[in-house]
Image (cartoon, rainbow, N blue to C red):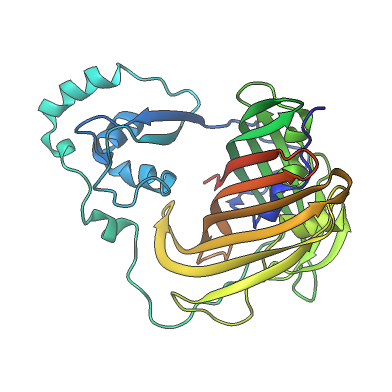
Amino acid sequence: MQWRWPIPLSALLVLFVFTSLEAQAPGSQSEVNLPLEALHQVQAKDNLHLLAAYYYGDARQWVRIFETNRNAIQDPSVIHPGQVLRFFLSPDWTPAEPYNQWKSRVWRVFPFLRVPPSQVLEQTSALPPQNGLFTLRYHGTKGLVQQADVAVRGNVMYREGAKTREHSLALVGLLESRVNDITPEGYFDVTLRTVDLRSQGPPVPPALLDPASLGLPPMGEGIRVRIDNRFQIIKVLHGDPQLAAEVLAVTYPERALSIGDSWEETYTVRTNAASPFLVKTAFVLKSRERFQDQEVVRVDYKVQGKGEIPERKVAFTHRGSGIMYISRASGSPIYQNANVIMEFDNSATGATDTVTVSIQITNRP
């Protein structure tokens, strides 16, 4: 029996990410042009200045590497041989020469590349704490079209008879939202849809290519909702209300916040397979930073929940953590990175299926 995705990962991916684009003319559609993802295994004497010069042609772009690999790099001045770092490059990027050959040449010509980032981070990424309060609010405009790239990496391990099987996930896609109208009451009429979702790795079961299973809006007409400036759903105009609630699974708090403040969200997930179950998410307003040349606030979150699939005699637990950056100017989340683990325990067979997934959603500047 082939393993089926029994509940959506939207229980852990807490928010659809919006990012500003110019409104497109009716009937037009931009060509999907996904970035090239490259992996680099750190070698002795590597540093972010050096890697930025090789991959981006500009040593000052080391911040992009740091932001992309937040989960792997604690201090941008310290990376260790053997670490694997991820780069998102132009689709037509090709190296002019092998890395080791390039490194030995430029090492002599550009001595500054030997110097790892130190306190530069304090000036270009992190901002000093701001006295006063933050009020998180979304500010959309009529006709605004917004897009974001999504990348999913992970593994699904499951029992099939006496054998344990494994699927590797390497999915990429494109998300889109459109502000259709703003009501007299100030609500936003928004359409959310998945434009593209495909595997860049080995073939995967069709269930894993269903956007809804990842907490993403469906393709085609998507879902259409009316929301307020706290992302609270006022009305579902088109599509499944449960899926809409999962796609927009966080509401900005009514109260103003300061750095270090926290809040919690609890909501119920309902699916055809599982009994209704609660998901609890704890948020912390972590810091002020710069990301993609704009001021953002960083919000860290942790998610946990558990439930049952009675028909299969399966109990499951899931937990996850992630970060998102929210633009101070627009109130829009423009980046999210979530890491999730789901375990399914079958009481009849004693088998445990495990899903480990990393989901990254990044705005298109």
Q: Where is residue 333 in the image (x, y as percent from the top left)?
A: 57, 58
Q: Position of residue 220 (x, y in %)?
A: 82, 39
Q: Position of residue 328 (x, y in %)?
A: 50, 67
The answer to whether residue 324 is left or right of residue 287 is: right
Asked if residue 139 shows in the view, the reply is: no
The quarter of the displayed image where residue 202 is located: top right
* Image quarter (top left, top right, bottom left or bottom right) of the N terminus: top right
Q: Residue at image x 59%, y 52%?
A: 19
The answer to whether residue 73 is left or right of residue 168 is: left
Count numbered badges in the picture. Answer: 0
Asked if residue 295 shows in the view, the reply is: yes
**Image position of 136 with respect to 333: above or below:** below
**Image position of 3 with respect to 364: above or below:** above
Q: Which of 263 and 356 is in front in this view?
A: 356
The quarter of the displayed image where residue 69 is located: top left
**Image position of 207 with respect to 125: above or below:** above
Q: Position of residue 101 (x, y in %)?
A: 23, 17
Q: Which of 47 and 297 is in front in this view?
A: 47
The answer to whether residue 44 is left or right of residue 194 is: left
**Image position of 105 with respect to 222: above or below:** above
Q: Residue at image x 15%, y 28%?
A: 107
Q: Nearer the viewer, residue 62 or 163?
A: 163
Q: Residue at image x 30%, y 17%?
A: 98
